[in-house]
Image (cartoon, rainbow, N blue to C red):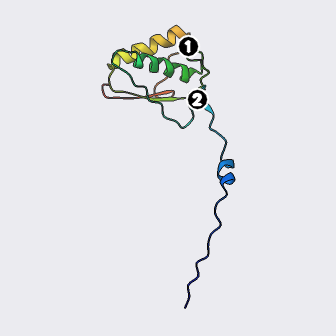
Amino acid sequence: MTLRLKRRAAPQAAGFFERDLELPPEALEGIAREKQIIAFAGYFGMGKSPALENLTVCAVRGIPWCGRAVAQRPVITFDFESASARYRLDIKNIAERCGVKTPVVPDELEIGRAHV
């Protein structure tokens, strides 16, 4: 008995590069799209936490961040360094400074924290 293997046709290179080309909508203009994860890194005291707190308020309220359009959406944030009281005050002050309502927890802002 002879076993004959059927050879599959090689995939067309052009087909691979022509399918699934639609990108998810931008969440942060020119920087991040939906379903992407953003990581901020830098030395201690450079302002990563305040920048992310500001971005959080902008995303919840759909207002521009650093001149870039931001899609309005609920936000999940993790902060394992900042004191809870400091974080809450910062979010409240940023919202006030931007002239928007403070995000509603947990409906608009879900906070994962080490210190509650």
Q: Give the mark toward the camera: 2 or 1.
A: 2
The spot of residue 46 in percent (x, y) is 38, 15
The residue wearing badge 2 is: 27
Compared across the picture, whether 16 is left or right of 54 comes to right
User: Which SS class for mark 2?
Assistant: strand
Q: Is residue 94 above or below residue 4?
A: above
Label at residue 49:
none
Dot 1 surroundings within 10 Å: few (below 14), some, or many (20 or more)? some
Dot 2 surroundings within 10 Å: few (below 14), some, or many (20 or more)? some
Label at residue 100:
1
The spot of residue 32 in percent (x, y) is 55, 30
What residue lies at 59% left-to-right and 21% top-to-bottom?
62
The spot of residue 28 in percent (x, y) is 57, 26
Residue kind at label 1, given as amino acid type: Val
Image quadrant containing the N terminus: bottom right
Residue kind at label 2, given as amino acid type: Ala
Q: Is residue 50 above or below residue 2?
A: above
Q: Quadrant of the rendered structure where residue 3 is?
A: bottom right
Image quadrant containing the C terminus: top left
Compared across the picture, whether 16 is left or right of 48 comes to right
Choose the circle earlier in sequence order: 2 or 1. Answer: 2
